[in-house]
Image: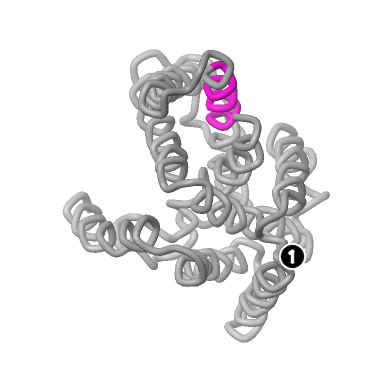
Amino acid sequence: MLKQRVLTALLLAPPILVGLFGLQGLPYALFTACIVLLASWEWTNLAGVITTRARLIGVVVVAVAMMALWWSHSVQQAWPLWVGAIGWLVNLYWVARYPETQSQWASIPGRLMMGVWVLLPCWVGFLQLRDSGAEWLLFVLLLVWCADTGAYFAGRRFGRRKLAPSVSPGKSWEGVFGGMIVTALLALVFISWQRLDVGQGVLLITGTLAVTLVSVLGDLLESMLKRTRGIKDSSALLPGHGGILDRLDSLTAAVPLFALLYPWI
């Protein structure tokens, strides 16, 4: 399994890095749209849609929504990010109260609607961060990676208090705090690199800690959906890694929130 994971990562890393940091404008939008549409295909499975035809219809609906956002120039506006922010507040309530609130979202239409405010604002966030500068897109990607890595090692060493045992029994509050420490250090590195003043630095650290917490929520949301669906991975598209959503879950929450906070930083 480890060999398969490493091989998949080595094969996918170059084209993904070229797509994220080598493309701009419409080519970049199309590249990231393809990734989000693959995630949409997996989301229909998490929502409980079984037939191939119905799942394809779901992907087409997301594609049409993306085209509408692009041609109306809404991808340059803040309102899709605010839709995502409000949606993640609802997701937080559902994750925190799981399984008591399961009846509120467990229907297929409910889970499909959830995917709208998870996936579309994420795509818009990717576009706006790339327009803001590749370094800030890099920052968010590193933030999520550092949060996951810090949480893993801190959780293994110090984990005692369970974060959300009914959703993901392996996660602990100590792991979350460990991830926040590592991402705060990352923010300090970027403050020095970007030569931010004191006010901007404080805002970046504060925003980084908030985005770190939200990235954990992204992971928990997918765990909740997979638990409800009774599956381990969102798909088998990435051998050894599961599906696209298994790699994007934290980013679906982190990217739109950081894009929303960026103008203040």
| Quarter assignment of residue 54 | bottom right
Q: Nearer the viewer, residue 137 or 89?
A: 137
Q: Is residue 28 above or below residue 140?
A: below
Residue 146 placed where, x, y %?
Answer: 38, 31
Residue 5 placed where, x, y %?
Answer: 25, 54
Residue 157 placed where, x, y %?
Answer: 34, 16
| Quarter assignment of residue 235 | bottom left
Q: Residue at x 63, y 75 (%)?
A: 63
Residue 190 placed where, x, y %?
Answer: 40, 27
User: Disc 1 marks which residue?
Assistant: 108
Instruction: Say left or right for 30 vs 228.
Output: left
Q: Residue at x 35, y 31 (%)?
A: 149
Q: Could one spot residue 155 in this view of the protein?
A: no
Q: Nearer the viewer, residue 140 or 229?
A: 140
Q: Residue at x 57, y 40 (%)?
A: 220
- 206 magenta-colored: yes
The residue range painted magenta reads 202-213
Name the amino acid, label 1.
Ile
Q: Is residue 9 above or below residue 208?
A: below
Location of the C terminus (image quadrant): top right
